[in-house]
Amino acid sequence: MLWFFLSLASAFAVAVVDALSKKALGRSDPYVVAWVRLGYCIPFLALSLFWIRIPPLDAAFFRVILVLLPLEITALLLYTHALRQSPLSLTIPFLALTPVFLIVTSYLILGERVDASGIAGILMITAGGYLLHLHTVRKGWLEPFRAILREKGSRKMIIVAFLYSLTANLGKVAIRHSSPAFFGVVYFPLLAAVSLPFLGVVSQGAYKTLLTRKRIFLLIGLFQTIMIFAQFTALSIAEVPYVISIKRTSLLFSILFGWIFFREERIRERMLGAVFMVGGVVLILL
């Protein structure tokens, strides 16, 4: 059960990171906040370098990293844009689609199979997405689905969910050719280093902004580090769909944070949808 508690810790940590990121987006653009989620965890990750052994690295590890980098950066940019454009309670829940996509991608990439209860899980997650916009049903039974498509942040987060189904599996391949601790410590600083030169191009005054809001940025970095260690340790001892499924319970924490800190509306309706989505995740897990 250790993998379960590690995955749950990862879920809580990423929900905190999302809430802090949305707060930071009030005064910083999405490109800066996206980089902060990568770069500001480096000071905390660096502390672990003293006791982490560097494993033998083969060509397969570097090939996977080359594929992972553009996918991860694209997903993170879409993620932060989604947080800025839409409420937490209408964006984060769609990450529950990742386990649905994982049913296919885990089989294609890793040969891992999820049993037939996954179909029931998919139906529950779909129902949960419908319930997020239940108040629009008076305009027609299909209106909740149309509302999803109209919400820019929701559309972007659905794409992110698919990309994360790829990066989760590729990340496990990289772990198999290195170690969980080494990959977790090296991967995010590498992402930060690769994306830093482009940050100044796409965001004017970005480098100055990175140094002006240290308190909230360091908090983002701290909880991102907790998420990294918890997730990659869990991935080393459990199947990818199981770990990511539990991690997606972060959407419940995010909806609560949206209500508590951002006064988001229709929380009961959105929480009901989120509960259905988590129920679907559990069915996929079983």
Image (cartoon, rainbow, N blue to C red):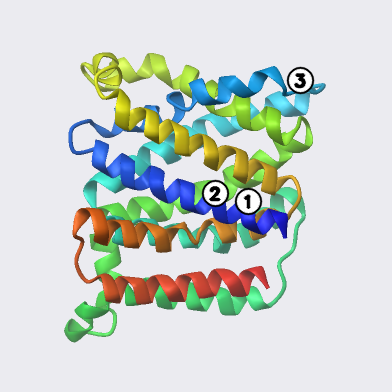
Residue 98 pos. (x, y %): 52, 57
Instruction: Name the one closer to the observer, 178 or 112.
Output: 178
Q: Amino acid at mark 1?
A: Leu
Cβ atoms at labels 2 and 1 below 8 Å apart: yes
**With respect to residue 99, does 39 lie above or below?**
above
Separation (CA) of disc 1 from disc 3? 23 Å
Instruction: Determine if residue 86 is in view.
Output: yes
Q: Is residue 45 left or right of residue 17?
A: right
Image mark for residue 54: 3
Residue 254 pos. (x, y %): 37, 57
Q: Amino acid at mark 2?
A: Ser
Q: Residue at x 22, y 48 (%)?
A: 85
**With respect to residue 247, does 219 lie above or below?**
above
Q: Could you say whether the residue bearing mark 3 is in a helix, strand or loop?
A: loop
Single out the mark in the foreground, 1 or 3. 1
Residue 159 pos. (x, y %): 42, 51
Q: Residue at x 76, y 20 (%)?
A: 54
Q: Could you say whether the residue bearing mark 2 is in a helix, strand or loop?
A: helix
Give the labeled residue for mark 2: 10
Q: Is residue 213 left or right of residue 116?
A: left
Give the image quarter of residue 172: top right
Instruction: Determine if residue 64 is in view.
Output: no
Cβ atoms at labels 1 and 3 below 8 Å apart: no
Earlier in the chain: of badge 2 and badge 3, it is 2
